[in-house]
Image (tube, grey):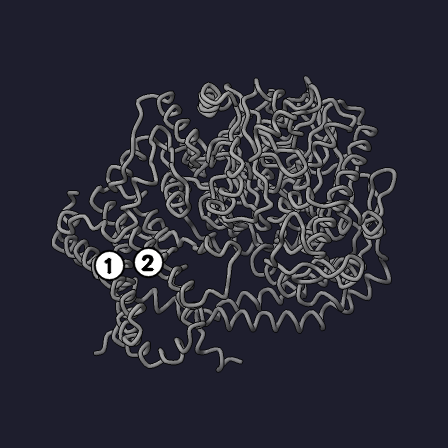
Amino acid sequence: MISTDGTLSMFVRVIAPVVWRNDSKVAAKFRRFSATEAGSALDMLKAAELEKDSRRRKLFFRHALDEARHSNYFRDHARQIDASEAGLNSRYDLIHATRQNLYQGLPLVDFVAFVYLAERRGAAHFRSLESHFKDRPEIHDLFKRIGKDENFHIRYSKRLLDEWTREGRGSEVRAALRRIRLNRAWDAWRRSGRQMGDFVSRLALRISYFVVVPPFSLIQRVLQPQQHGGWLTAQQTTSNMDEMEKMF
Amino acid sequence: MSTTISAKKLGKKKSASWIERVISPVRTLHEFNQLATRSGRGWWLIPMMGTLVMLGVLLVFIQVIEYVAPFVYTIF
Amino acid sequence: MKVIGISAYFHDSSAALVIDGKVVAAAQEERFTRIKHDSGLPLQAVRFCLDYAGLTIDEIDHIVFYEKPLQRFERLLVTHLAEFPKGGGQFVSSIGRWLSRRLWMKNEWIRELGCRADQILCSEHHLSHAAAAFLHSPYETAAIVTADGVGEWVTTSIYRGITDSSGSRIEKLQELIFPHSIGLLYAAITAYLGFEVNEGEYKVMGLAAYGTPRYMAEFEKLCKVNDDASLVLDMDYFCYNWHATDAFTPALEALLGPARKPHAKLTLPAVTDDDRRYSDIAASLQKFTEAYMLKLVQQAQKLTGEKNLCLAGGVALNCVANLKLLSEGPFESIYVQSAAGDAGGALGAALYMTHVIGGIPRRPELNHAFLGAPVEKSDVVRFFSDCGVPFREFATTTEMCRAVVDCLMDGEVGGWVQGRFEHGPRALGGRSIIADARQPYMRERVNKKIKYREEFRPFAPACLAEDLKKWFVLPEGRVEYMTPFMCCVANVSEEGKKVLPAITHVDGTARVQRVEAAHNPVFHELLSIFKEQSGVGVLLNTSFNLKDEPICNSHGEAFATFMRSEMDFLVIENCLVRKEDCLRLSREEYQADETLVMAGRN
């Protein structure tokens, strides 16, 4: 059975000539990669901050530094390739990144399982791109350098999972890996469903705006003309518990 | 005091009982009716609110779409 | 009585915990989620408050929301009916949100917070603002003026606050209602000038100093102000009441000229006609707002006869207008709470429940703003040690301050993290970036290389309380309750303009923070030692965050911000980290021995 990572690699190789077709697209993708890596760096740094075990903390911190470095690589390469999109202070463009708060949101084993699977997927993606850019040494070398770090991330996270398995927590580790894989698929499913649901909701509301609102609007315009500003003498409300209990 | 957020201090995350899930929205609607009549801004807001709430129920079901995405085409 | 106040769903969600009249903790949600102006239910802020006090949600007597949601929903419906057939876009986005979620707020709270329905109460929006100002102030009686965009219906209101032997009460006197709002006028022009609403108002204030108020006649067309300080906006120029995304109509552009595109280059002092026009419009808006606020507080004085004034609501954060109120207004003393915007609504709701409804006596005094999460020294030391970050730990605060002053004297810029973080948008020495204000190049350097923000943005000074009069000119005897929280600007003295170029804005003012030893001992010590060496007890003080990010909270976030900018040093409690020592952390050569790392020794 072809693994999902293998499927991803194949897919990336097939669409790469379209997706990375010119320098402007390459620079845009690199900026997005930079933001993603910066976000990962913030997540791993938060994990390092909150983790109590000294060794795991060191590993998460090392991972955070790697991701931050990758973010800078992608940002700098984007600038070199396409300097036309200047930011506010072009030399000091800040790559805006958001944190997903993964460490706080997941149990420890799930978090490490997430890291392992995400890094494996990322490494497969970058291997495909390394191959695609074999005729552009500066980009080829970039992905090669990043790949080295990704391999370390895969190794350390796998090692942690293996250690827990050896300690008798194998079922917990397997369940975590299963959950993360399923969550990824489930999230993709929900994302597409959310988009569709959003579209249908908006359509329903738009229709109701032109069906439900007009008669009430007419009644309001007839029975209650608009006020024209000026002070209103305020009525004291919310001065006792009964009033505080009400939502109005 | 550590800055680590401790989830257990917040109180067990719980689903509102079905009674509360029904009562709370009904109470909200009742309060809105009181507001519409008390504020003098228009009794007509009450039937409009009723219609919108029915639409809201539909929207809540539509939110379920994110769980049944591929089947939407067969429903609509 | 244990009360949690919550503000949420609009912008700047926050939570506050008041126990028997004492404010125990308060924080904005954005500090935890790292989403700027986070408007979601402030779960993490509530968790922090409970954690800090060692409580569970079940032990809380009341959870008070800062406004009446049904009144706000009523306003939306009535406005849509009035504006039909315009406003379909806004109807879809806003009503959809309400019908699917916000109307059923109580269910969400029960589910997410684990509370009971009978714990949940609702205050009023402007009342919460008024309570946050008055009940946290040092006054026994005061006039209270609240002005913001809009709450449920109210945009501007005047109250009287009284604390006497029978308890505390806040009496509502007059109010203006939507859509006539000085806050929304300011927001609409902020959008016109190409800045983001609820974020860019500070930038408009900074921009105003570069312009000449040549557009006053145009502003009088936009907004008619009566003698009693009521105002009426000409809604032909604005569409914030029905448009999904825009705040102004083409009529405004016909009057003032084409709007500035967001992120368009803006050079100041202005060299192009457009830049000149934008800065003149900003100056006109600022002058118009100041004149209006002055009239408003005069109306408040007329109604109440009080000598003290509390200001609240987003417009109270206009520190330039506040100087005008101090200088020319009828009140002897003015207080603005540190989180005067919506974030302060949570605190106000909790205080209102405690003192007014609950009858718990209050003790009027000047409170500090350090209500957020602290940093544990042991956590910091362990973090740096485990991660191999080179750092120096000092035995005493004095030694640490001396080392920091040495860095500052060398022209370095650093991050400063001490104790609990501040409640509100200002950095007051809890989470600050500091630098030597005497260096002329410092402003450009910090703007460009550290904060990554527009060049025209000024920086604020932190000044020893005892030196305030030497460097700044302020109305005599009125400023003691404004300056600790950077709520008003001051004119920089002639000597100050020569000595402190980095914090002197182009119009000769600065938004000064008065640093008292009682409320801020470590920061005061730093300034004192800096004064020993330099002769000047003033430092450049800006918030510890990068562009478009919330102010940092924890030691990890401070370290991340430090590494992502060109700051030279970072101080967290008694630990000092220098950038030059950390450079190897960023380089590929920092491998350490992989086996050692995997085995846990490094």
Q: Position of residue C74 (x, y in %)?
A: 71, 54
Q: Position of residue A13 (x, y in %)?
A: 31, 78
- Residue nearest the observer in this picture, C178 or A158: A158
Q: Is residue C158 left or right of residue C68?
A: right
In the rendered structure, find residue A28 and report the number of the disc placed on it.
none
Give the residue displayed 64% in from the left and 66% down from the top: C92
The C terminus of chain C lies in quadrant: top left
Whether pointer 1 and pointer 2 mark residues with C-beta atoms closer than 8 Å, the reply is yes
Q: Is residue C520 visible?
A: yes
Give the residue displayed 32% in from the left and 51% down from the top: A44
**Discs 1 and 2 share one subunit:** yes
Ranked by sequence position, the earlier of labels 1 and 2 is: 2
- Residue nearest the observer in this picture, C107 or A78: A78
Amino acid type at image mark 1: Asp
Q: Is residue B66 left or right of residue C555?
A: right
Amino acid type at image mark 2: His
Q: Which residue is mark 2?
A: A70
- Residue C360 lies in what quarter of the image? top right
Mark 1 lies on a secondary structure that is helix
Q: Is residue C557 above or below residue B72?
A: above
In the rendered structure, find residue A149 and report the number of the disc placed on it.
1
Q: Is residue B73 left or right of residue C315?
A: left
Q: Is residue C37 above or below residue C418?
A: below
Q: Position of residue B27 (x, y in %)?
A: 62, 51
Count neighbours of disc 2 (C-alpha within 10 A) and say few if under 14, some if 14 to 19, many if 20 or more.
many
Count neighbours of disc 1 (C-alpha within 10 A) and say few if under 14, some if 14 to 19, many if 20 or more.
many
Q: Is residue C24 left or right of residue C217?
A: left
Q: Position of residue C362 (x, y in %)?
A: 60, 22
Q: Chain of mark 1?
A: A
Q: Is residue C56 above or below residue A69?
A: above
